[in-house]
Image (cartoon, coloured by chain):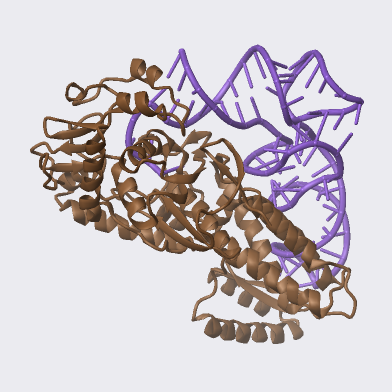
Amino acid sequence: MELYVYNTLTRKKELFEPINPPHVGLYVCGPTVYGDPHLGHARPGITFDIVFRYLQFIGYKVRYVRNITDVGHLENDADEGEDKIAKKARLEELEPMEIAQFYTKRFINAMDSLNVLSPSIQPIASGHIIEQIEIIKKILDAGYAYISEGSVYFDLMKYQKDTNKYGVLSNRVLEDMISTTRALDGQSEKKNAVDFALWKKAQPEHIMRWPSIWSEGFPGWHLECTAMSSKYLGETFDIHGGGLDLLFPHHESEIAQSVCAFGHEPAKYWIHNNMITIGGQKMGKSLGNFITLEEFFTGSHKMLERAYSPMTIRFFILQAHYRSTLDFSNDALSAAEKGLKRLLEAKRNIKKINPSKETTIEISTINQKCYDAMNDDFNTSMVISNLFETATIINKIIDGSEKINAKELEELNILFEDWYTKVLGLQDEQSSNMMPTIDGLVKMIIELRKEARENKDWAKSDELRDQLATLGVKIKDGKEGVSWTIE
RNA sequence: GGUCUCUUGGCCGAGCGGUUAGGCACCGGUCUGCAAAACCGUCUACUCCAGUUCGAAUCUGGAAGAGACCUCCA
């Protein structure tokens, strides 16, 4: 069994071979915590959750590091030298760390509800200022940075001249960029407009600041990931992930920093998830068209026709391949919701199956198809397609048009446990510790209704059904008796 | 302007040279006191033009349209 992953560095699918098997180091750029998590955050969260889960599923020991950026980034338009968290803090009259703390918690809660597993380590940028300063020193010593008015800048021209590596990831041509770079604040301090800051001297109004030998200030925008990935995964690790929008300049700059500080590139494989679009356009803070995850869960956004559960969001995202753009719409989400429900029902129906002597189906074939799909660059869409076909088979078995023996039935059970639950991370949202109680209560009412129906008291029967419906409990009169679900 | 990507049926979305993707919707059927749900079945594709090939949604060239990055962004 061989896993192939698409490596952005080479623009093709490559056989996955960890540097130190069975260990795998996975680093993913986490959120900047100055706002509520939105649908865009769900995509990398879920994409790399799948990578994390699948690598473990096939036997690797994975250390998954996903950072929290709480140092903020520079605003580039107005507010010279003020970063996002500081700005928000000033507006709301809070400590910057209150803002960061608040949104970090919101982010983690949202990931939990999406059933995204916790990373092995979730380091915060502000907790690694020392490590970042150390890397700046290394780059200075190597001669690829210079000090200017209390700030430290990366010398891109020198880096390019010596290594010719700038652009390996993003295919950028440095010469072209120089001619098209727009004027930004502080350019006069730089040798070249394209140079990026490793350390930035804080302006008087800038409230997030740390001491350093250069100035009171804050670390540059790309440094945190270099510092934290090298600290926890080593100078060279297996997979670096993140959103496609981080490819340039963020990841390109990380490579440059690593090459200068450590003498080699940081990651063997680069994996990038694509964007979620809304009406064909990228969803983003600056565009004002983003919907927060909480708004999805509660339905409180003007573009949403109603609420969508976390599992619906997860399933919606998994139905597309991670490298494709995924377009949001109410119709698409409703379709995902119904599809997920169908799969869940099928999974539950497995329990109702009575095995036969003979079997007309072979589970191992389906199982192999799921492996093949995942081994081909994590094709979750294909796995789901296989599960749907299995759902049809399950229904046919119950219907009597297909047969399954005890051995295959056991494999069927494992199939859903493995792929639906473990790898795709889908879960039954209705399970809670109150369920046995609710189940008992509903069954009592169903019993009452059954009596009414036996007496042909349709009015009473319908009243019970309607009242349960108003509580969100849907009664289903099936061939094999009555069942119910919570809507 | 530069770099890159995409264009699949009513909607979403796989597909990487030959075989049904799948889901949702629609329609037909089964079931039902009625209804809903559920289940079964069926239909609608590959932006356009040219080329390579026995054979192309899939490869090549061209056209049109859309998007991403080049500025913080998942």
Where A297 falls versus A44 (above or below)? Answer: below
| Residue placed most toward the observer, B10 or A364 | A364
**Residue A3 appears in view:** yes
Q: Position of residue A414 (x, y in %)?
A: 69, 72
Where A263 falls versus B2 (above or below)? Answer: below
Where A92 falls versus A419 (above or below)? Answer: above
| Residue placed most toward the observer, B35 or B51 | B51
| Residue placed most toward the observer, A270 or A115 | A270
The colour one sees for chain A in the rendered image is: brown
Quadrant for residue A185, please give it: top left
The colour one sees for chain B in the rendered image is: purple
Quadrant for residue A50, please give it: bottom right
Q: Position of residue B29 (x, y in %)?
A: 88, 59
Q: Position of residue A456 (x, y in %)?
A: 75, 81
Residue A30 falls left or right of residue A21 = left
Q: Quadrant of the N terminus of chain A?
A: bottom right
Q: Residue furthest left?
A: A204
Q: Position of residue A467 (x, y in %)?
A: 57, 74
**Residue A388 appears in view:** no
Residue A117 falls left or right of residue A183 = right
Quadrant for residue B45, please give it: top right
User: Residue at coordinates 42% horizontally, 49% vertically from top-left?
Assistant: A236
User: Residue at coordinates 55% horizontally, 40% vertically from top-left?
Assistant: A327
| Residue placed most toward the observer, A172 or A334 | A172
User: Residue at coordinates 46% horizontally, 31% vertically from top-left?
Assistant: A168
Q: Quadrant of the C terminus of chain A?
A: bottom right
